[in-house]
Amino acid sequence: MASTKKDPVLVVLQLTGGNDYLNTVIPFTDPLYRDNRPAVGVAEDRILKLNDQVGLHPTMGPLKNLWDQGNLAIIHGVGYANSPRSHFRSMDIWHTCEPDKLGTEGWLGRATKEIDPNKENVVTAVSFGPSLPRALALPSVPVACVDDLDSFGLLTGINEAEQRDKILDRFTRLYSPTIGTGAVMDYLGQTGLDSMKAADILKVAPEMYSSSIEYPDTSIASKLKGISQVHQANLGTRVFYCDHGSFDSHSNQVGMHDKLWIDVSQAVESFFDDLRENDAADNVIMLMFTEFGRRVHDNGSGTDHGAGGVAFLAGDAIKGGEYGEYPSLRPEHLEQGDLVPHTDFRSVYTAIAEDWMGMDAQPLVGGIFEKPAYF
Amino acid sequence: MANQDIALMAHLMRRAGFGATREELETLCEKGYEAVVEELLNPTEEPLDRFEMMRYQPWTWRPGTLPGMGAAEWLWWMVNTRRPLEEKMTLFWHHIFATGVSKVDHYDEIQNMITMFREKGMGNYKDLLLTLSMNPAMLYWLDNNENHADAVNENWGRELLELFSMGVGNYTEVDVRECSRAFTGWTFEAKLPRGPLGRHDWRFEYRPEDHDEGEKTFLGETGNFNGEDIIDIVCNHPATATFIARHLYNFFVADEAQVPAWQVTPPVDEDAIDALADAFIDSGYDIKAMLRVLFNSDFFKNARFAKLKSPAEVVVGTLKLVGGSDFPGPGIGDLSRQPNYMGQDLLNPPSVEGWHTGAEWINSGSLMRRINFTADMVGDVSRPGVQSIVNRLRSQGDVGPEQFVDTCLDLMGPLEVSADTRQELLDHAVPGGSLSWSNEAAASERVSELLQLIVSLRDYQYA
Amino acid sequence: MLTQVAAGRTYDFSHSVGRGAQSGMGFSQPVAAAQGPNGVVYVVNRGSEGISNVSWNRIGYGARVSQITIGAEWGQEEFLGEFSKYGDGNGEFIWGSGVVVDSQGRVYVSDEWLNQINVYDQDGNFLSRWSTLESDDGGEHGTASIAIDADDNIYVTDGRSHQVRKFGSDGKFIASWGSQGSDNGQFNAPWGITVDQAGNVYVADHRNHRVQKFTSDGRWMASFGSPGTGRGQLHLPTSVAVDPEGDVYIADWSDNGQHPGRVHIFDAEGTFIITLIGDAQELSAWAKLTVDANADYLKRRREVNLQNMESEWRFALPTGLMYDADKGRLLVVDSQRSRFQIYNKVTGYMVPQMNL
């Protein structure tokens, strides 16, 4: 558990598109790495070495700082058996914890329901992005999906503030329980008022926020800044979700992967700097995951869909270090040319749920999994 | 023209299509209700030309797995078709035979299934089921390619009985097994992988050597059945008639209990279900015969605003209302994402059970999306459909707040709202006084604002 | 058939170049290509819409101009670089639709949505842009394709106003002709356009299923093809090219299911000679890289039957043609397969004995 009385908060940063494990945490002393990466291999002198075996991609300096501070856990070889190598299906599996059948409920939706069973707080879970990630999907669990915190709300197309206030005031009256009859009308009314409430609650976050940290001008930085604003406003949000991508580097991987990790690393560093400056870091951890790693051998300009990947946990409460072995690159150990995962992603979720959120993990992840000691 | 005629025609077009503009409704009213129903059932207008889409948006030809973009062509089709019921039935079958890119991983294959629904969706149910049983996306979605003579996989066999024909409670586990055995060997040919040169079609393949030739006993009948025989038996079962009838009722008439509850929850309107089921049986499984009964029935005509719009209906209906989406211009991919933001990711349903409908469409996030999308569209007075509403109001000259509100409600449906709601709208309009066209811009602005408020109403969420 | 012999001509399939890729070595919905005096081939990639929260490329995946060289044989192609991207700023385009190179090596790329031409130097540096619209233009416009004559005059088709427009290389309007209809000199959604050595203009009259030939000032001269999917018939022609001998090449979108695209060859008098349907039985060098790196791709390819294999050999909605007079060969922009199929026009071909 967190060593503080503040409620533990989880931030999930999804690296959409299949991040290339081999070029993120690089096994630079393994000659097979060089053999398999004639086109997209990273030169050894550029690698940010963590020890005499692995190093981070050269653009991940800001994350290397977190590592040096002991606040970054590298989770090797994460995934699940029989990876389908499909973006959609793989992402669904990560979201629903259902590798064998199609699941419709998300593990974080279940967690949110556990945290707030009576829906007392409509912003218990906040996702930054236009659509609800399946990880948060569960009927009757409200999740605020925010594109942009500054323009979040109902009828935001009406520009003139006074006019919009009048309309929203009218909206509240029109959705009040005194108007309309029948269960569905009542439900619609309540839901409309919930939407208003979420917008009203979240509106205060940017107003209350102040920080000396300048976030970079990137989409992932603005999402993490939004998360920081909501978190620091103490609105009771316990689960944050955002994503960045696309990491689907079939071609021209070198430039593309560099840019992606520059953006993510800088944004994540700014985020934690911001939280620390404002004494809001000790109850926050961040999980970074991707739906699969990429093919071991490159295709001349990029890499194709693979299996085993790498995940990261970051935060002051995290015990930094490497968890698990780097999966073998030897041809006889690969499956269809891919790294074989040895750590089930649900064991990572289990550790987060039990050792951080203080919840029973089994109903969230649908089984019992060994949990590494990340905290 | 009698306003009741317009209201009824608007109801028909909302349900049997995706709505119609006031100009279209007036033309349709002149034809008469029953003639319009016949035209919907037997469309004479040309289908859309997909080469138009391929010329301007070539990526829509085989969209592969471009995240979220696969429904762009279909969205364009729904908005622009001149054969609205055909398209609405296509959506209906996608609700029932819910197949998703989450597993299939080829948008193009599911798009092919959509095209098949368009061609066969108002035909014979037996023919449709048989074609579906040979559809590669469906075979893969429900694992029938893993259903072998020596190793039966029951996924397709079970869902055929549970979700596509009779519903639970009408067969035993043994029937599921025997049904699945009959479909062994129904699979598809190996196709070229997606990379590096794009997608290729999957083709159905029947492998006699992988078909279980043994005797099967299914629903009390015994023989060396193949898949066609199973479909014969299933279509002939009275539960199938009722099952399809309930689906049509829920989709076209009024929100019903969700499918998993059907075994224990009787239909809202038993007589209606019986009438539809009888049409199915009497016509030899003709879907069109059922639809003819449905649209001409009193239970349909009296069901105005008795169901919540699905996200597809919200988006397509709004785009039709405001106009300006006939050319497949840039941004069509983003438009096709809108239903997803409201909880209906077309071509990617959450599971083989499809979407839960009715009130289950609504949560605080999806409601906000519905309202904001619709309000942004009707708030754009440059859109031809909005212009047309503004012009109609202008043609009335200066009017008082009451007529202003009533005319807007009329042109947005006609939308029927409670007296309290109307009073609130009136209270909103009164401080602005009469709608005066001496200041064009200000008048347009007021109209736009009132339309935005109207589409935000709870009442507007109903079809 | 890899080699086609007819009417004293031989078209011998050479090789294919390209693969699907949103950047780098490959193409994304390539729609047009042109070769500069420096031997560089410029390829306009239409790209696709997508959701992206990557700030440097909003929603136009893969939209760009690729610079490559294409050698005489398989595997000699080289990726040199790429320029432009999705957008409406200087040098950017929303719907890239055509490309030509002028006598000075400047590259002109047409934009079918913004109705403008971006001009770049031979290395892809932006020089200028100009509109293909006139101030009094109403209605809808779509600058569908572009051609250039020996004097660097620019011709564009407008697929939505059913016109051909002629400009100076600086964008100064010179003339226009055509209106919607099916009479001689009228168009229905014209698309591809080219100029022959004599300065005559050929237009792929897409929805009239024909190609029309005009003098440089727009006087109607002739029409090629009749509607249909049979021999020598055209269905939705997209592009046209003419070689120095006057043979006319027309790409179309035959609605034949298995073969969604053909290239028809006519002689200068309009006599039909032969049809190509695509022959890429061997993977291009870049495509082979992808397959080699994906063991499961290779496995699956070996399980595929002949009929399914064939769908990869054939054209899929080709929308561009380029005749490379230097090397005497036809390059077909095989748009949906993100590649070129290349045919050598062989002279002095010795037909082998039939009883071999």
Image (spheres, rainbow, N blue to C red):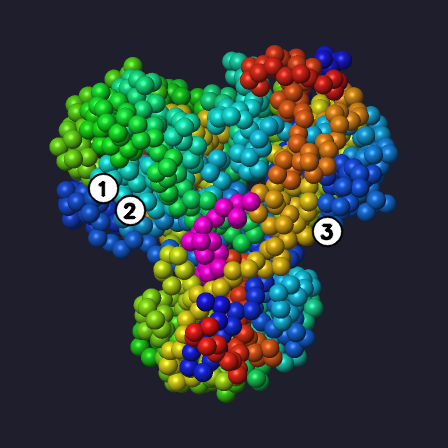
Determine which residue is flagged by label 1: B123
- Measured as percent of width and height from the top left, residue C130 is found at 57, 70
Determine which residue is flagged by label 3: A39
Note whether A307 is above or below C38 in the view shown.
above
Note whether B299 is above or below C155 in the view shown.
above
Q: Farthest residue toward the bottom? A: C198
Determine which residue is flagged by label 2: B119
Q: Can residue A113 be seen in the rendering of this structure?
A: yes
Query: What segment carries the magenta color?
Result: C299-317
The label on residue A31 is none
| Circle nearer the viewer, 2 or 3 | 3
Marks 2/3: CA distance? 48 Å
State yes or no: residue B188 in magenta: no
Q: Are marks 3 and 1 on the same chain?
A: no
Front-most of residues C285 and A72 = C285
Chain at tag 2: B
Quadrant in the picture for residue A270: top right
Residue at x 40% of width, y 78% of height: C273
Q: Amino acid at mark 1?
A: Gly
Chain at tag 1: B
Secondary element type, mark 2: helix
- Measured as percent of width and height from the top left, residue B19 is found at 30, 42
Secondary element type, mark 1: loop
Quadrant in the picture for residue C131: bottom right
Asked whether the residues under the numbered discs 1 and 2 touch, taking CB atoms below 8 Å apart as contact, a structural biologist would say yes
- Measured as percent of width and height from the top left, residue A209 is found at 70, 30
- Measured as percent of width and height from the top left, residue B61 is found at 44, 53
Q: Amino acid at mark 2?
A: Glu
Residue at x 22% of width, y 20% of height: B220
Left or right, C26 with respect to B312, comes to: right
Q: Dot 2, how many residues are within 10 Å of its Cα: few (below 14), some (14-19), or many (20+)? A: some
Q: Amino acid at mark 3?
A: Ala
